[in-house]
Amino acid sequence: MNDAQWRSWTPYVGPHDPCPPIRVKWFVVPPNQYIVFQPMNLPQFSLEEALERGTLWPALYSSYPSRRAVKGGKANG
């Protein structure tokens, strides 16, 4: 994962866990977690693009891909 919004953590793997361990887990940190106030004159998407992306400001946009797409499976299936 090369995207700056993705973080990983390594859960504890016990010696007697009944299931195969998942060594690394990934999660997305939304960009709004880092913007504590709205600065003036932020760039804006066009209205059509803002409706498609769900936000008016590119600084707050995150694509949030599905788990299947991240793991290499089909996104729509």
Image: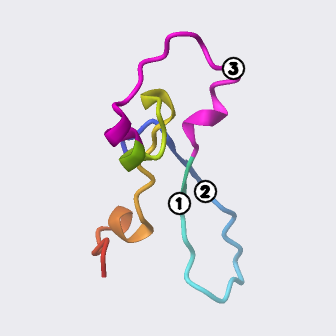
Quarter residue 46 falls in: top left
- State the separation of the CA atoms marked 1 and 3: 33 Å
What residue would you read off at disc 2?
Answer: 10
Nearer-N-terminus badge (2/1): 2
- Can you tell which mark lies on residue 37? 3
Q: Amino acid at mark 1?
A: Val
- Labelled pair 1, 3 in contact (Cβ < 8 Å): no
Q: Nearer the viewer, mark 1 or mark 3?
A: 3
Q: Position of residue 29 (x, y in %)?
A: 58, 44
Q: Residue at x 71, y 74 (%)?
A: 14
Q: Is residue 38 left or right of residue 51?
A: right
Density class for disc 1 (Cα within 10 Å; few <14, some 14-19, many ≥20) is few
Helix, strand or loop at mark 1: loop
- Is residue 65 shown above or below 18? above
Q: Amino acid at mark 2?
A: Thr
Q: Which residues are magenta?
A: 29-50
- State the separation of the CA atoms marked 2 and 1: 5 Å
**Residue 35 on the magenta segment:** yes
- Labelled pair 2, 1 in contact (Cβ < 8 Å): yes
| Residue that sits furthest to the bottom in the current view | 18
